[in-house]
């Protein structure tokens, strides 16, 4: 999850099941409109650039191409525990 939030530049991450930290994060954002704006702007930019329809289609086509050409890829040895 930290990668999705761009290490805190696109959102705030709190530990799961920690209502105190969640309240602290919410209070901090309520008190800082500039920070809220920065997070919103960065989050929107990341969403548009990473999940824009053309990017999603290009990624999907790359996966299809990779799977269709899997027989041409070198063998990978997996270690077993």
Image (cartoon, rainbow, N blue to C red):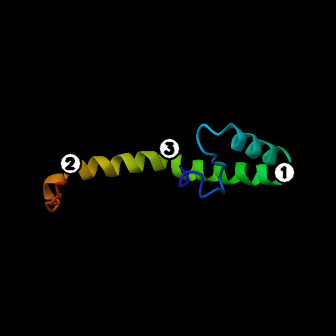
Left or right, residue 71 beside residue 27: left
Which secondary structure, mark 1?
loop
**10 Å crowding of disc 3: few (<14), some (14-19), many (20+):** few
Vertical order, 24 against 71 (above or below): above
Badge nearest the viewer, 1 or 2: 1
Residue named by callout 2: 68
- Label 2 – label 3 distance at C-alpha: 22 Å
Regarding mark 2 in the picture, which secondary structure is present there? helix
Query: Looking at the image, is mark 1 or mark 3 nearer the viewer?
Result: 1
The residue tagged 1 is 32
The residues bearing labels 1 and 3 have C-alpha atoms spaced at a distance of 33 Å
* Distance between mark 1 and mark 2 Cα atoms: 50 Å
Query: In the rendered structure, which disc, 1 or 2, sits on the residue that comes first in sequence?
Result: 1
Q: Nearer the viewer, residue 10 or 28?
A: 28
Give the percent coordinates (x, y) of residue 10.
Answer: 65, 52
Residue 52 at what x, y percent from top left?
53, 46
Residue 42 lies, in percent from the top left, at 67, 54
Q: Residues within 10 Å of mark 2 (few under 14, many from 20)?
A: few
Please provide percent x and percent y for residue 7. 60, 58
The residue under label 3 is 53
Seen as rendered, the residue at the extreme bottom is 74
């Amino acid at each position: 999850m930290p990668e999705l939030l761009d290490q805190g530049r696109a959102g705030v991450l709190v530990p799961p099941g920690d209502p105190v930290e969640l309240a602290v994060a919410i209070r901090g954002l309520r008190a800082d409109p500039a920070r809220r704006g920065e997070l919103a702007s960065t989050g929107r930019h990341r969403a548009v650039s990473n999940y824009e329809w053309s990017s999603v289609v290009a990624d999907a086509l790359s996966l299809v191409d990779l799977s269709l050409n899997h027989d041409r890829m070198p063998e990978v040895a997996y270690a077993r525990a």
